[in-house]
């Protein structure tokens, strides 16, 4: 496998993007490199791409090929995880976080600095809070270029400045520098000068750690010397990460812009440094949230009526001396209150999407993002109704809630998700004639693929009803073809 093979695979995925998911069989030797490269080449990916293989070939009676293939197909067929992933030994890893750890163990791959996306055991457990979702309104495209002028240099005691100068000579444009520990390097003057000369000449030098776990930092004086020379910290990126080749292949990016983007996670390839102090939820805060939840339910569920409302209250309700908690049926713990919130939020976000109530949508999404207990699902923006299997985006598209559609897409809603009948949000919007919503969904990369094409054809031709020109225009925008 080399750069041209990676580009060929990315092109094939682009040409066949009408499929719901992709499973790629690959040799284990370069699988980590391929999964990392594809994670960058597949821009604004909205569907699942999984690479898998085996340590023991399928032709052998005792093998791990069947188990790995069936596991990859099961995940690809039941979940939308819009990333390029690697599945091996009952585990789904992020493609650009994985490295090959063994040439003979069945558990050949590991992700030292990032937890698996999926663990497959008796239950399939998806770590939704770590799954990347597209939040930009852009269509999928395959980038078809990687710079070949990037190389990896592993430092060792005794390396000379002359060796580094020779290594960084043209046409080399980027160097992944494998340093000691947390980013240390020999402090001899010839070594530091050679690295500084390369950086000054426009070579982008990125420092990563030779250790499988951990990242580079400026905690030590020796690490700060590299920073002063112009070397860019690569944090906890793996040696297999092809981010530098990807950035240097984009002609529109200046050298300084490439250096700036090295420390910015583009596909989850590095851990963003956060200095946020996490506060544990309190029972008072949980109850306050539940009160807000219920008030929004009441407001959204209240039917529109011109008849004045009549309120009846008991005399005791206005008493100033009654204790506010005398009617409490039991004492709640913070965990019980948080569980109640988790049950209510999915109902509220679907109701808000149907009513196009952006304020309530914001309330749900903000609460999910600030949840530290792990009870509110990180994928609340894609939570499904139990009966219909519809996500909030389905509900918003069906009801013509244009503002909600826009907010949901920018919050990570999946445009390729199908409901229990096999329909996407794009199909529902087109069927209802919501032209503006169809435009936004198509802009975000939605396609009228698979069974939706057949349903659309039946809807337009099979019913025998005369279809007006506007409806045909909407379906054409959605991607329906008469052929």
Image: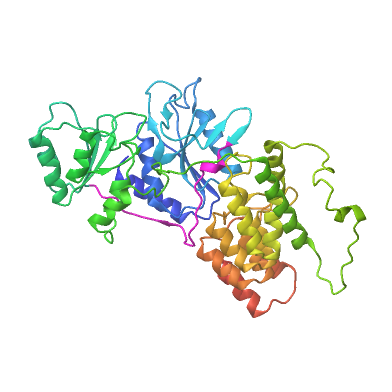
> Does any portion of residue 365 appear in the rendered image?
yes
Q: Residue at x 87, y 54 (%)?
A: 317
In the picture, measured across the screen, residue 34 lies left or right of residue 470, that is left
Mainly helix, strand or loop, the magenta region? Answer: loop
Q: Quadrant of the C terminus?
A: bottom right
Q: Nearer the viewer, residue 221 or 304?
A: 221
Residue 139 in magenta stretch: yes
The image quarter containing residue 143 is: bottom left
In the picture, measured across the screen, residue 171 lies left or right of residue 396, that is left
Q: Quadrant of the N terminus?
A: top left
Q: Residue at x 32, y 52 (%)?
A: 261
Question: How many numbered dots are placed on residues in this image?
Answer: 0
Task: Where is residue 97? Give x, y as percent.
Answer: 40, 38
Vertical side of 326 occupied by 358: above or below:
below
> Does any portion of residue 448 appear in the rendered image?
no
The furthest residue to the front: 321
The image quarter containing residue 257 is: bottom left
Task: Where is residue 388? Give x, y as percent.
Answer: 73, 52
Q: Nearer the viewer, residue 388 or 318?
A: 318
Task: Where is residue 417? Give x, y as percent.
Answer: 60, 52
In the picture, measured across the screen, residue 444 lies left or right of residue 429, that is left
Q: Residue at x 30, y 45 (%)?
A: 3
Residue interval drawn in magenta: 126-148
Vertical side of 208 occupied by 138: above or below:
below
Vertical side of 293 occupied by 222: above or below:
above
Q: Residue at x 68, y 44 (%)?
A: 284
The image quarter containing residue 84 is: top left
Task: Where is residue 443? Give x, y as percent.
Answer: 51, 65
Residue 474 in magenta stretch: no
């Amino acid at each position: 496998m080399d750069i041209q093979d990676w580009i060929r695979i990315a092109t094939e995925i682009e040409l066949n993007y009408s499929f719901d998911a992709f499973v790629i069989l690959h040799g284990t030797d370069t699988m980590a490199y391929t999964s990392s490269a594809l994670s960058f080449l597949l821009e604004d990916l909205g569907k699942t791409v999984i690479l898998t293989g085996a340590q023991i070939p399928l032709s052998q009676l005792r093998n791990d090929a069947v188990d790995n293939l069936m596991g990859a197909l099961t995940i690809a067929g039941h979940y939308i995880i819009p990333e390029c992933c690697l599945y091996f030994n009952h585990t789904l890893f992020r493609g650009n976080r994985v490295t090959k750890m063994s040439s003979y163990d069945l558990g050949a791959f590991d992700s030292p600095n990032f937890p698996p996306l999926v663990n497959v055991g008796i239950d399939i457990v998806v770590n939704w809070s770590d799954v990347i979702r597209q939040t930009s309104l852009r269509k999928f495209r395959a980038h078809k270029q990687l710079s070949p002028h990037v190389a990896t240099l592993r430092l060792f005691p005794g390396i000379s400045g002359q060796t580094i100068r020779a290594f960084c000579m043209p046409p080399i444009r980027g160097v992944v520098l494998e340093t000691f520990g947390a980013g240390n390097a020999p402090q001899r003057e010839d070594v530091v000068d050679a690295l500084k000369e390369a950086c000054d000449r426009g070579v982008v030098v990125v420092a990563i750690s030779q250790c499988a776990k951990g990242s580079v930092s400026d905690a030590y004086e020796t690490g700060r010397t590299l920073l002063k020379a112009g070397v860019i910290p690569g944090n906890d990126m793996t040696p297999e990460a092809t981010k530098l080749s990807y950035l240097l292949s984009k002609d529109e990016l200046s050298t300084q812009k490439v250096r700036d983007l090295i420390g910015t996670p583009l596909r989850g390839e590095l851990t963003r440094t956060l200095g946020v102090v996490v506060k544990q939820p309190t029972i008072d805060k949980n109850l306050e949230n539940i009160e807000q939840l219920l008030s929004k339910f009441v407001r959204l569920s209240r039917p529109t009526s011109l008849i004045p409302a009549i309120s009846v209250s008991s005399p005791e309700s206005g008493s100033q001396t009654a204790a506010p908690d005398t009617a409490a049926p039991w004492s709640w713990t913070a965990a019980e209150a948080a569980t109640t919130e988790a049950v209510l939020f999915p109902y509220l976000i679907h109701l808000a999407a149907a009513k196009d109530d952006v304020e309530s949508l914001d309330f749900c999404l903000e609460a999910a993002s600030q949840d530290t207990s792990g009870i509110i699902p990180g994928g609340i923006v894609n939570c499904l109704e139990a009966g219909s299997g519809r996500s909030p985006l389905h509900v918003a598209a069906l009801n013509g809630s244009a503002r909600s559609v826009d907010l949901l897409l920018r919050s990570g809603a999946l445009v390729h998700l199908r409901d229990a009948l096999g329909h996407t949000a794009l199909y529902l919007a087109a069927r209802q004639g919501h032209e503006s919503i169809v435009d936004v969904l198509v802009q975000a990369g939605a396609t009228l693929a698979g069974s939706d094409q057949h349903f659309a054809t039946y809807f337009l031709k099979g019913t025998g009803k005369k279809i007006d020109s506007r409806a045909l225009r909407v379906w054409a925008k959605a991607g329906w073809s008469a052929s």
